[in-house]
Amino acid sequence: MPSIQRLGILTGGGDAPGLNAVIRAVVKSATNAGIQCVGLEDSFDGLIEQNRSRVLTPRDVTGILRLGGTILGTRNTGNPFEYPIATSDGTRDYSDRVIEMFHKMGLDALVVIGGDGTLAIAFEFCRRGIPIVGVPKTIDNDIVGTTNCFGFDTAVAFATDAIDRLHTTAEAHKRILVVEVMGRYAGWIALHAGAAGGADAILIPEIPFDLEKVAERLRERDRWGAKFSIVVVAEGAYPTGGKLSVVAEASAGRLERLGGMGALVCEALAALTGKETRSVVLGHLQRGGAPTSFDRVLATRFGGKAVELVRAGDFATMVAFDPPDIVARRLEDVVGKTKTVPPDYDLLRTARALGVTFGD
Ligand code: F6P
């Protein structure tokens, strides 16, 4: 078994509630096992630039369990293999520099906390000899191999609360309220928050929608006297034969930014139903604030398991939730894939059975 004495830790991609809880769990359990932790700032930038790292002791992570964001900072545009250079329109490959810095800093292994993009980068470095354990993070819950990512529960809880609040105006004014949620190309947040908030229509990327079908369901509600409706729209949802609503096209090292489908749906439903209709975009509010107790526990378990894997020398792995256990997956089995809502998912079937329309 390799002797690990110095462990680097970084957070990459978009922030998600629970990142600090993982950092805390890693630093405390590693330190208690005699391993020194080094926090790397702003994702892989901490291994590209000098002086962008610091030793983390249990003292440094005391009190961060309940905090959103990440004490290490993060970025989703810093892929070392395709690093965007401000002064030119191209990218540069800094992967050799990362490997060199890793050795120069006397690190023996890395814990990389991130979403699909960051884990794919981690896997590339594993192939080039860096011992890494990955920890899956995303509010989108779209990482293959794990039932849950931390951050998802918090995002769903926030979106559910927002839907509850929107019910007030929807009922009082007999309006249609459309709420757009995040999730990229997966409908997990929309489906779970929609189900928890009692939405009447839920539009997700996995099921292209026909707005006439949605409108007909909402008219039906009017006929039996409901008079108001709540429509949840995933940012990645799109109409049958239509396309995604993109705010900004993909650029060097950066994915396209989705958004705006909620407003389009709102406008169309107003025309189709003749009702007063309003839309709200929850946006980054879903990523902010304190993690729920579920996410704190999951993140803590992920951090503890990551250190166990480091100590066992089980690298090129990702910790994962396979209820009731926390397990290890091979990174090669999870990167480059997206976990979308399966057509036979029981919540999908149940929502349909309860009368929720998905616009199909
Ligand atoms: O992956 C998390 C996520 O919040 C997605 O739901 C969303 O599409 C994207 O990140 C937004 O990214 P940014 O913070 O770069 O706008």
Image (cartoon, rainbow, N blue to C red):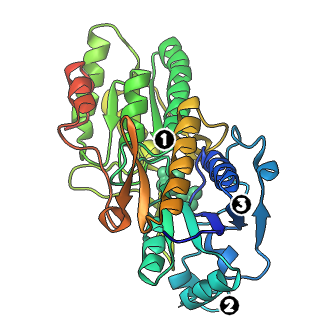
Q: Amino acid at mark 3?
A: Leu
Q: Are marks 2 and 1 in contact (CB under 8 Å)?
A: no
- Nearer to me, 285 or 118: 118
Instruction: Tell me, for residue 152, which label it has, or none.
Output: 1
Quarter of the figure that contains the C terminus: top left
Q: What is the spatial separation of the Cα atoms under label 3 and label 1, in whole angstroms? A: 20 Å
Mark 3 vs 2: CB contact within 8 A: no
Disc 2 marks which residue? 87
Q: Where does label 3 land, which residue?
A: 72
Quick check: 328 above or below 251? above
> Front-most of 17 and 56?
56
Q: Position of residue 246 (x, y in %)?
A: 44, 60
Check whether the beta carbons of the residues at disc 3 and disc 1 lie within 8 A of each other: no
At label 1, which amino acid type do we have? Phe
Q: Nearer the viewer, residue 95 or 307?
A: 307
Query: Residue 31 sits in which quadrant?
Result: bottom right
Q: Which mark's residue is nearer the viewer, 2 or 1?
A: 1
User: Residue 359 falls in which quadrant of the image?
Assistant: top left
Q: Residues within 10 Å of mark 2 (few under 14, many from 20)?
A: few
**Image mark for residue 228:** none
On screen, residue 97 above or below 58: below
Q: Position of residue 343 (x, y in %)?
A: 19, 41
**In this rendering, the label closer to the viewer, 3 or 2:** 3
Q: Amino acid at mark 2?
A: Thr
Cβ(mark 3) to ligand 1 < 8 Å?
no
Disc 2 residue lies near ligand 1 with CB under 8 A: no
- Measured as percent of width and height from the top left, residue 170 is found at 49, 19
In the structure shown, which secondary structural element does the residue marked by tag 2 occupy? loop
**Looking at this rendering, what residue extends furthest in the front direction?**
1
Left or right? Give the position of 184 relative to 26. Answer: left
